[in-house]
Image (cartoon, rainbow, N blue to C red):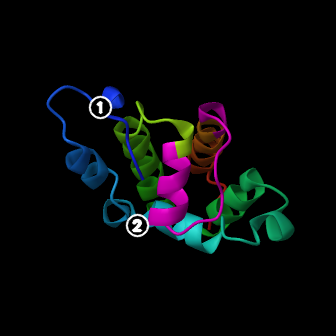
Amino acid sequence: MTVPSSRQPAGSSRRDRLRQASPDRFPMIRALLRGYLHEDYAAEHGSAEGAVRAFCKDASPQEMEKLTEEWRRLSVNTASWTVADIGSLLTKDFGGAWRPESKQELARLFQVIRSAAASGEHA
């Protein structure tokens, strides 16, 4: 994935930016992408939102807490990235099949996660 240098904060190298978004730092997001937002997510869950809701139903309260925190951190770390760059990260690096079409779509999924965590809509 290429992060254009014009989108990087001053004093931040491309390598540092990619390290901040490393899948190793986001195990719950990786589990969501590989286990629910895989190549068959539309057939199995109808939509990306449906897949996220299924993950949230199966997740423990601790997993939901971790997922919420990881999604928040990843959102901050990739705030200046293009949607295409974020999509590449989620598919190539994290192993999912879903590619967001907009940052609004990412925000909607985060809202689904936060709502599920707050309401106890999980295991």
- Please, is residue 9 above or below residue 21 in the view? above
Which of the two residues, 52 or 121, is positioned nearer the viewer here? 52
**x%, y% of residue 100?**
64, 46
The residue wearing badge 1 is: 8
Q: Is residue 10 left or right of residue 109?
A: left
| Other-residue count near label 2 (Cα within 10 Å), few / some / many at <14 / 14–19 / ≥20 | some
Task: Find residue 111 and name its label.
Answer: none
Which one is in front in this view, the residue at disc 2 or the one at disc 1?
1
Q: Amino acid at mark 2?
A: Pro
Element class at badge 2 = helix
Element class at badge 1 = loop
Q: Amino acid at mark 1?
A: Gln
**x%, y% of residue 105?**
67, 38
The residue lying at 57 percent from left, 72 percent from top is: 34
Spatial separation of the CA atoms under disc 2 and disc 1: 24 Å
What segment carries the magenta color? 85-105
**x%, y% of residue 31?**
51, 70
